[in-house]
Image (cartoon, helix red, strand yellow):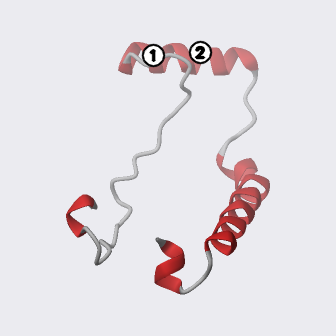
Amino acid sequence: MCGEIYGITESSTSIIAKELCLASRKHLKPLVIPKLIKNKIKQITISFESLHGIPYIIGAINGNHIPIVAPKIDPKSYYC
């Protein structure tokens, strides 16, 4: 869908997405996700599970603030 909007091929879109993920992991992960020791990780997962009932989670991101521009094709399928 993005390729159609911006006029690029599917393979180019795939390459760009892969490069974005790699760059994010390399440069943003150290800033956003601090290095935690095992005991601290275990404490966080137990706390998260007791609050939300989901095991093995150390956090969550709420994406409600991300705007979604509905495409011309089937716009009702996209909800922001």
Q: Could one spot residue 79 in this view of the protein?
A: no
The location of residue 57, given as percent across then percent down, is 54, 25
Residue at image point 29% right, 73% down = 73
Q: Position of residue 12 (x, y in %)?
A: 69, 74
| Above or below 17: residue 35 | above
Q: Disc 1 marks which residue?
A: 49
Residue lying at 33% horizontally and 54% vertically, measured from the top left: 64
Towards the viewer: 3 or 68? 3
> Residue at point 70% right, 40% down?
34
Q: Residue furthest right?
A: 26
| C-beta proximity under 8 Å, tags 1 and 2 | no
Q: How many numbered dots are placed on residues in this image?
A: 2
Q: Quadrant of residue 35?
A: top right
The numbered disc on residue 43 is 2
Instruction: Give me the C-alpha separation between circle 1 and circle 2.
Output: 10 Å
Quadrant location of residue 10? bottom right
23 vs 56: above or below:
below
Q: Where in the figure is residue 30, as x and y percent of width and height?
A: 75, 49
Q: Residues within 10 Å of mark 1 (few under 14, many from 20)?
A: some
Which sits in the foreground, 9 or 54?
9
Q: Which amino acid lies under the numbered mark 1 shown in the image of this protein?
A: Glu
Q: Secondary structure at mark 2?
A: helix
